Each structure stands twice: as C-alpha cells, then as structure tokens.
Amino acid sequence: MTLLDGKKTAADIKEEIALEVKNLKENGKKTPHLAAIIVGNDGASLTYVNAKVKACERVGFESTLIRLTENTTELELLNQITSLNIDDNIDGFIVQLPLPKHINEQKVLMAVDPKKDVDGFHPTNVGKMALNLPTFISATPFGILELLERYKVETSGKHVVVLGRSHIVGSPMSILLSQKRTVGNATVTMCHRRTKNLKEFTLKADIIVAAIGIPEFLKADMVKENVTVIDVGITRLADASKKNGFRLVGDVAFEEVSKKSEFITPVPGGVGPMTIAMLLKNTLLACQRSNS
Ligand code: NAD
C-alpha cells in the first residue's frame, strides 16, 4: 500500500509556487494577490478561509480577507464583488461557501469575473472545464488530478467509480477523469444517493473517488484487491480526547480498506491540503495571465 501523501505533496507545490513568486518579484512583475470574502461567523468556514489567507502569506502572495456580517444583503455582497472585479490589484478572489440562506448562491457565483474566478465555480469556467479548454479547474478536483499525476497512478483505461455528484467534487471529477488528458482516459461510473446496489459498482472499480460526506461509508468488503482510493470526505466527529473537541473522519474506513489498496489518501492529510495548494496555483495562474 502506498499512501498518497497530500500534506507532503501540497508542501512541495507551495515551495514551487514560492519560488515562482520570488522570480516574479526579482523581475519586477506583479505579486499574486488573492482576496476572500466571508459572510457570517460559521466556525468551520472561518477556519478554512483563515487557512487560505495564511497559505497566501507563506508563499509570498498578497492577500485580503473581507469579513461581512451575517445580515449583509445580497446587493451589498454583489457590490463588494463588483469592486473586486474591477480592482486591478486583485488577481483572483473567492466567496467562501456556504452563504447565509437569504443570499442566492448561484447569483453570487455568477457575478464573479470568470478571469478572477480562482475557485472555478463560474458557469463559464465550468463549461470550459467540461470542454477540456484552458480554465481554472476547481481546487479539490484539481488537487486530486495533481496527486494522481505526481504519484504516477495510472488512470488510462481504468474503471473509476465516483461516489457523489456535487458540483464542486463528484461531477467535475467524473468529467475530468473521462477526458483525454494526462490524468484521464478512464471509464467513469458516477454513483449517488439514488444508485441501486452501489456495492456492485464499487467492487468492479480500479479507482474509487469517495465524496459523499458519510463517515467511513466505504468498507473493505465493498472494494477489490489493489484498488486505488481517493477519500474526499471530511466530517467532524465529536471526540473528547482531542484538544479542539473533534476529529476529522473521511468517507472511507481507512484501517480496513487500506489493507486492500494499492494507493490510498488518508484523512486528514490527503485531499484537504491539496485543495489549498491548488487554490494558490490558480491564483498564480490568474496573475501570470494578467502579467502577460
Ligand atoms: P455534497 O455534500 O454536496 O453531496 C453529497 C453527495 O453524495 C450527493 O451527490 C449525494 O447524491 C451523494 N450521496 C449521499 N449519500 C449517498 C450514498 N449513500 N451513496 C451514494 N452517494 C451518496 O458533496 P460535497 O460537497 O462534494 O462533499 C462531500 C464530502 O467531501 C463532504 O464530507 C465534504 O466535507 C467533503 N469535501 C472535502 C473537500 C476537501 O478539500 N477535502 C472539498 C469539498 C468537499
């Protein structure tokens, strides 16, 4: 069994990005600048967004965190987005999800200039991704592709089963892995909440991408020998023995499934750290595009 070490790979990518930033600075070019908007006080969202801002600082990016109160109106948020769209100093920005219920998420994501949409959520960028055109691939699927590539996991001709059909993970993952690209050319089956006899599919999979959000859903009796498993799930389970009162659990019963796996990602330390690294990569890309 080989562990697909997202923590180490993400650190390598961040080092490469830091080197690029150093080069940009030495050549008198603009330094990448990422902005993040967060609305409200959700604890997990604040943790995620702070981690993104800190990661920017570590690689030498500029960063701006815009904190808006829970009762911010949709119009106020849209105005904030317009300001970032027209600000030449900002290369890319993200709107941390989820948003409060009174704000229409789709409307907000549509308002982001696709050239600055480093999360890759704008329909223009999703469309380009689906057509295999150059664009921002959203950070989690991008991170999975990168992890598979760096560990030289063969995907061509393999049967991939994707569990979950969300817009941010399952759906793009199934599209990307079936495309004609370096990490791709797979035969993909997508399973979701309504899939019947799911085990019949997972047992035939060479590679499983689990993105459903059910702790330890995928058990050893659901996979074949030498399977590759990408565990995207992150659920916080209460754990009094931990300092912060919780532990992170993936969608895969790691102990038992890892014994049958050729490659597997751990949780934490797998897909999670890759997501932030690829957001930085997209921001660097946005900056390089605006520099050229
Ligand atoms: P989601 O929560 O929006 O949707 C869950 C998906 O799972 C749905 O498509 C649903 O049809 C499917 N599903 C639910 N129960 C199922 C079952 N019994 N069998 C088969 N399919 C089932 O999905 P999401 O936003 O992609 O999140 C999934 C998990 O991944 C969550 O734990 C989330 O926290 C995590 N996540 C992690 C990262 C990361 O950076 N590591 C990024 C995004 C999401």
Image: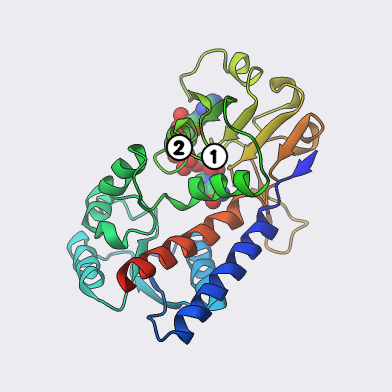
- 149 horizontally vs 129: left or right: right
Viewer-proximal residue, 263 or 83?
263
Query: Residue 220: x and y, percent?
Result: 75, 26
Q: CA distance from mark 2 to mark 1?
A: 8 Å
Q: Is residue 101 above or below residue 226?
A: below
Q: Is residue 137 above or below residue 154?
A: below
Q: Nearer the viewer, mark 2 or mark 1?
A: 1
Q: Residue at x 39, y 40 (%)?
A: 167
Q: Residue at x 68, y 48 (%)?
A: 267
* Color theme of the render: rainbow
Question: Mark 2 belongs to which amino acid?
Answer: Leu
- 66 horizontally vs 195: left or right: left
Q: Which residue in the structure is indicated by mark 2?
A: 176
Question: Mark 1 belongs to which amino acid?
Answer: Val
Viewer-proximal residue, 42 or 271?
271
Query: Residue 191: x and y, percent?
Result: 50, 24
Query: Residue 161: x and y, percent?
Result: 56, 26
- 223 horizontally vs 282: left or right: right
Query: Residue 108: x and y, percent?
Result: 25, 55
Helix, strand or loop at disc 1? loop
Q: Residue at x 23, y 68 (%)?
A: 85
Q: Quadrant of the C terminus?
A: bottom left
Q: Which residue in the structure is indicated by mark 1?
A: 183
* Occupied quadrant, residue 252: top right
Helix, strand or loop at disc 2? helix
* Occupied quadrant, residue 260: top right
Judge: label 1 CB < 8 Å from ligand 1. Answer: no
Circle 1 crowding by C-alpha within 10 Å: few under 14, some 14–19, many from 20:
many
Circle 2 crowding by C-alpha within 10 Å: few under 14, some 14–19, many from 20:
many
Closer to the chain start, of discs 2 and 1, is 2
Q: Is residue 214 above or below residue 46?
A: above
Viewer-proximal residue, 151 or 189?
151
